Amino acid sequence: VGAREALATAQAATPSPTPPAQRIAYAGMLLQTGDDRGARILVNSLNGVTGLTAQETADLNRLRAGMAIREADALNAEGRQADAYDVLAPELARMPDDPVLNMAVARLYSGADEPAKALAVNNTLLARDPSNLQARQAAVDAAIQAQDWGRAERLAQEGRQLAPDDPRAWL
């Protein structure tokens, strides 16, 4: 509640209309506090706004992706993978190579008990960025789900070699 009150105070002190950069920042803050509805309202208020800077566009796209991922993960937990993919699809069309979005797709495959497909998505991410420890851990998890113990061990071993001082590589 404290963050929401601070945001309400900041919004009240901001001249109207609120500049896009501030709406983006406010939406990010709302998303971090778990106010998905408030974040969505602010993000949607930017639909069709022209003249955004490259940074504002990138920040807005990251917010949209974050909201989609959060919703898709909730749907995936309910066993509604098709609905979850429908939520991710517009963001994937906007940012097809985004690793965080692709990891969300891999989680959908894992949730649908299709670990080979999840592993394929994570392997693609690792081919692009072998040091991505989140993708590596997801690939290890998918290999374990697929009962491909050798692949899981190789992925884990490569992770420890790439980042021997990072505790995440040892999990």
Image (cartoon, rainbow, N blue to C red):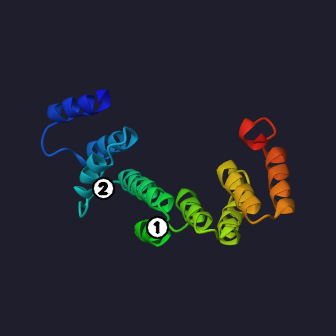
Is 110 displayed left or right of 127 in the figure?
left
Q: Position of residue 115 (x, y in %)?
A: 68, 67
Classify the position of the N terminus by image quarter. top left
Q: Above or below — where is 58 with respect to 7?
A: below
- The residue under the point 74% across, 56% down is 140
Is 133 displayed left or right of 15 in the figure?
right
Looking at the rendered structure, the kind of residue marked 1 is Arg
Q: Which disc number belongs to residue 52?
A: 2
Image quadrant where residue 25 sits: top left
Of 52 and 158, which appears nearest the observer?
A: 158
- The residue under the point 41% across, 59% down is 68
- Nearer the observer: mark 2 or 1; the answer is 1
Is 170 displayed left or right of 27 in the figure?
right
In the orientation shown, which residue stands out farthest toward the left? 16
Few, some or many residues within 10 Å of mark 2 (<14, 14–19, 20+)? some
Answer whether labels 2 and 1 touch (C-beta < 8 Å).
Answer: no
Q: CA distance from mark 2 to mark 1?
A: 35 Å
Q: Position of residue 10 (x, y in %)?
A: 22, 31
Q: Which disc number belongs to residue 143?
A: none
Looking at the rendered structure, the kind of residue marked 2 is Leu
Few, some or many residues within 10 Å of mark 1 (<14, 14–19, 20+)? some
Of 65 and 82, which appears nearest the observer?
A: 82
Q: Position of residue 125 (x, y in %)?
A: 66, 62
Classify the position of the C terminus by image quarter. top right
Image quadrant where residue 34 sits: top left
Q: Position of residue 145 (x, y in %)?
A: 72, 61
Is 25 displayed left or right of 45 in the figure?
right
Q: Above or below — where is 54 with respect to 89?
A: above
- The residue under the point 65% across, 71% down is 114
User: Would you name the residue on which mark 1 appears?
Assistant: 80
Residue at disc 2, secondary structure: loop
First along the sequence among labels 2 and 1: 2
